């Protein structure tokens, strides 16, 4: 039912945009007001979440290592798996963000007769994640052609490489297929792998269904439902949005508003969802700390400020009471002045 | 807040990247929204209505390309009593003679790079090549 709910929610969103955009005057809500609102929620929420995380102290040095840490000179250090310097941490983070190395290490545990448990390498998650994320990145970069005027050459290069196969007109893009396949595969993985299915929640399924629907509406708009989809007219609106002078010149087909509305929902939902791993991957102390606990002392930032208190200081503080109670002291009380 | 030295610049870079279309457009001189040049000869009729052509011309051209080059089907198209041969140069550019003002103005604005011109020639260019036929 958890995944059925995600589908229902997305279908409801599509219906809202489809029917809503048909009401006279409402195109400005779906095409202008909501995109601005969604982007503000996205940026504000993103910054809020990151600042919120940054306010949490890291009490221990908790980097995860899976290699030989820096030790004696004749023991070879695994510089990527147990980074000791900032440069090594940066290299490790870079590979994590760009190549998803921690997903590469994903294992599948199985119980066999005996009973004994085996751990087998399972690269599917890594492969699906690579397909999904890189397709999505290229699609976002390609969309810059709608927001920049004139369009920089590099955006054209991305489009050219993406449409290299020159299939159909307008040319089919590899990443369109990649994003759909990536969503479907990641969704399928959650359904088919029993223990992943067990721990999957609505907020795991919903973003996948939402992104799938965004890709589907985009593809339908580009290749199939082309009624009233005039790219010049649409670019006039999108460039208008980023120059704060949006105009809807002529009628735009409902599929455009559905696509834009779903993107707005994704943007507004982003900071409050698991999609925040986009910012979180940089903030993860298990990845971004140095494995140098033997060389550098990690001080818990929430420790109270306790000053060293020597015995001499202690005696200075309590000497009077110690003498009074007959406890021996190293330094006697100063001789009392005559009471006059 | 901890690690201000890295987190604040990181957030600033993120916000700059997300809002980059705002800054880039502010520093670039934008073009005006293109308007296609209508046929010089004053023809009013095309194979389909203007809105349909605006939306679907690339699919029509692709179908014609497949018909003619891949299936050898050169059967002409008749719309409202007027006969059209299937072809970019043979039909479209008979009336829309100016590639720069008709095709390129919108394509450049929307960064669309159709590969028509890998094989096709504009009427002016075709005229200079007549001898080789």
Image (cartoon, helix red, strand yellow):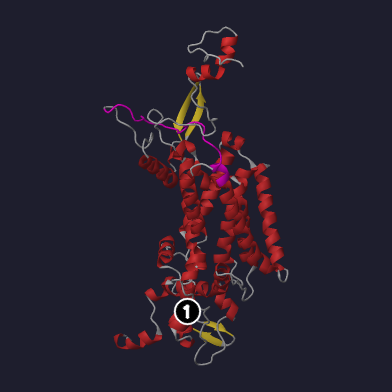
Q: Horizontal and vertical percent for residue A68?
A: 36, 29
Left-right relation of A247 to B69: right
Q: From the image, which quarter does the N terminus of chain A lie in?
A: top right
- Is residue A59 shown in magenta? yes
- How crowded pointer 1 is (Cα within 10 Å; few <14, some 14-19, many 20+) is rated as some
Image: magenta residue range = A51-73
Question: In the rendered image, which quarter contains the C terminus of chain A?
Answer: top right
Instruction: Indicate yes or no whether the magenta region holds residue A47.
Output: no
What secondary structure is the stretch in magenta mostly built from? loop
SS for dot 1: helix
Q: Is residue B73 left or right of residue A48?
A: left
Instruction: Give whichever of A168, B66 is nearer the camera.
Output: A168
Query: Residue at horizontal 42%, vertical 40%?
Result: A101
Q: Residue furthest front?
A: A340
Q: Specify whether A20 is left or right of A151.
A: right
* Left or right: residue B85 compared with residue A7: left
The residue located at (53%, 30%) in the rendering is A305
Q: Quadrant of residue B82?
A: bottom right
């Amino acid at each position: 039912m958890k995944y059925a709910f995600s589908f229902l929610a997305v279908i409801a969103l599509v219906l809202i945009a489809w029917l809503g955009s048909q009401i006279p005057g409402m195109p400005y809500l779906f095409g202008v007001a909501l995109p601005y609102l969604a982007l503000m929620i996205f940026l504000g929420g993103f910054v809020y979440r990151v600042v919120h995380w940054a306010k949490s102290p890291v009490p221990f040095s908790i980097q995860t290592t899976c290699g030989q840490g820096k030790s004696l000179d004749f023991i070879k250090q695994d510089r990527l798996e147990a980074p000791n310097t900032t440069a090594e941490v940066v290299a490790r983070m870079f590979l994590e963000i760009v190549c998803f190395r921690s997903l590469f290490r994903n294992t599948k545990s199985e119980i066999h007769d005996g009973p004994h448990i085996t751990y087998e390498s399972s690269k599917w998650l890594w492969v699906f994640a690579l397909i999904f994320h890189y397709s999505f990145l290229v699609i976002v970069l390609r969309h810059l052609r709608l927001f920049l005027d004139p369009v920089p050459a590099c955006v054209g290069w991305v489009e050219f490489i993406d449409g290299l196969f020159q299939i159909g007109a307008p040319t089919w893009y590899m990443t369109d297929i990649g994003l759909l396949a990536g969503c479907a595969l990641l969704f399928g993985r959650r359904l088919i792998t029993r223990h992943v299915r067990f721990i999957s929640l609505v907020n795991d399924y919903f973003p996948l269904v939402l992104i799938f629907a965004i890709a589907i509406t985009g593809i339908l708009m580009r290749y199939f439902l082309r009624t009233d989809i005039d790219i010049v007219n649409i670019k006039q609106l999108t460039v208008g949005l980023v120059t704060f002078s949006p105009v809807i010149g002529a009628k735009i087909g409902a599929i455009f508003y559905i696509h834009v509305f779903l993107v707005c929902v994704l943007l507004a939902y982003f900071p409050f969802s698991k999609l925040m791993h986009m910012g979180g991957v940089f903030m993860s102390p298990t990845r971004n700390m140095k494995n140098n606990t033997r060389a550098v002392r990690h001080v818990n930032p929430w420790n109270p400020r306790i000053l060293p208190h020597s015995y001499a200081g202690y005696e200075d503080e309590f000497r009077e009471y110690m003498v009074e109670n007959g406890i021996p002291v190293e330094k006697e009380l100063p001789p009392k002045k005559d009471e006059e | 807040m901890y690690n201000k030295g890295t987190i604040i610049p990181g957030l600033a870079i993120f916000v700059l990247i997300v809002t980059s279309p705002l800054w880039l457009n502010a520093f670039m001189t934008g073009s005006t929204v293109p308007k296609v040049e209508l046929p010089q000869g004053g023809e009013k009729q095309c194979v389909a209505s203007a809105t349909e052509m605006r939306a679907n011309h690339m699919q029509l051209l692709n179908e014609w390309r497949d018909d003619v080059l891949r299936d050898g089907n050169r059967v002409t198209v008749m719309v409202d009593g007027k006969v059209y041969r299937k072809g970019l140069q043979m039909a479209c550019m008979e009336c829309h003679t100016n590639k720069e003002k008709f095709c390129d103005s919108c394509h450049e604005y929307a960064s669309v790079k159709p590969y028509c011109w890998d094989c096709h020639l504009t009427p002016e260019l075709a005229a200079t090549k007549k001898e080789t036929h």
